[in-house]
Image (spheres, grey):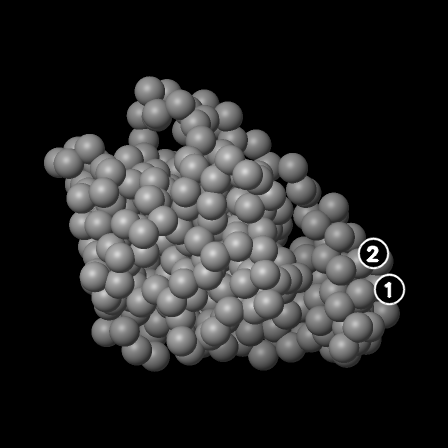
Amino acid sequence: MKNVLIIGSTGQIGSELVVALREHLKEKGTVVAGYTKRRGVPAQIRETGPAELVDILDKDNIEEVVKRYQIDTIYNLAAVLSATAEANPVNAWRVGIDGLINVLEVARIYGCAVFTPSSIGAFGPDSPKNNTPQDCVMRPTSIYGVSKVTGELLSDYYFRRYGVDTRSVRFPGLISYATPPGGGTTDYAVDIFYSAVRNEPFACPIPENEKMDFMYMPDAIRAAIEIMETDPTKLIHRNSFNITAMSFSPAEIAEAIKKNVPGFKIHYEVDPLRKAIAESWPNKMDETCAEKEWGWKPKFTLDEMVKDMLKHVRAKEQQE
Ligand code: AKB
């Protein structure tokens, strides 16, 4: 990995991955931040390296940037998250799949490696809920999940058929203070921190005891870098590896927050759409394939993540 293009560099994962990869590669490479007209590009990203307009639905545009910067690795982070995707399934499919095939075609022609994150959303109600295996029945019921499974299969197809070096992970709900997520089912686990530091009660859209997998962003960023740098001969799987760091329900994260913010209060205003999606996802995935094949190991536990999030969200709120 030397010259990297990050498509979707201003989103929840992208905005932190650009910074981490620029720091990781230093003068050994270039990290081009691909951004859209709609979102623009924050000063921090523009001032620390090249930034280019990249429309995932425009293959010629992707090709031109890849050629100009001699890109060898593409992080394809353009996605419409699960709850938002239900409002416009055709758009979610276009971004997730028409966009992905553009990226894969450019990668095939120019010999790039490609990382396209999958998600716990790739599983469905027929998948085992506990210790959900790496390889099992998927059959997701959300358009987000349908496009994630299709993306996994398409990425594996390009590897088998053309040798394109595609690799990825199934991310759990990601928790970060830097850039807010938008339209996900797991977003409550970010929003809850803003209520806690403002001393406001939190109205939770997910049922009290509904468990899902989660991960703190520093672990997620490390996973995205490590998997692309791992020795490919060790990989039995490619698209995509189960990875997780913690599994909790709204009641459990609320308890962990209460240890630090004793007066914190949560109540439940369940959103039927998010409830249905959450119920179709695993309680906890089994990540032993990622451990064995590329040494994956998360660092942050629930309590460590909660402490760190509270510290940073408090600091952010005080600045505003
Ligand atoms: C979502 O909730 O849609 C995402 C995900 C788990 O992929 N955060």
Helix, strand or loop for disc 2: loop
Q: Quadrant of residue 279?
A: bottom left
- Seen in the image, is 99 located left or right of residue 32? left
Residue 159 spot, x, y in % from top left: 21, 36
Mark seen at residue 262: 1
Q: CA distance from mark 2 to mark 1?
A: 6 Å
State which quarter of the image contains the C terminus.
bottom right
Q: Which residue is mark 2?
A: 259
How many other residues sit within 10 Å of disc 1, few (<14), some (14-19) or many (≥20)? few
Q: Is mark 1 within 8 Å of ligand 1?
A: no
Image position, residue 53 (x, y; %): 38, 67
Looking at the rendering, which quadrant does residue 141 occupy?
bottom left
Q: Which mark is residue 289?
A: none
Q: Are marks 2 and 1 in contact (CB under 8 Å)?
A: yes
Residue farthest toward the right in the current orientation of the protein: 262
- Which quarter of the image is occupied by the N terminus? top left
Q: Is residue 207 above or below residue 136?
A: below
Q: Which x, y percent locates residue 40? A: 48, 73
Identify residue type, mark 1: Pro
The residue lying at 24 percent from left, 55 percent from top is 63
- Is 191 situated left or right of 81 in this image? right
Q: Looking at the image, is 252 positioned above or below residue 111?
A: below
Name the residue at 20% across, 33% down. 163
Q: Residues within 10 Å of mark 2 (few under 14, many from 20)?
A: few
User: For this view, does 104 lie left or right of residue 144?
Assistant: left
Q: Amino acid at mark 2?
A: Lys
Q: Which of the pair 96/109 is nearer the observer?
A: 109
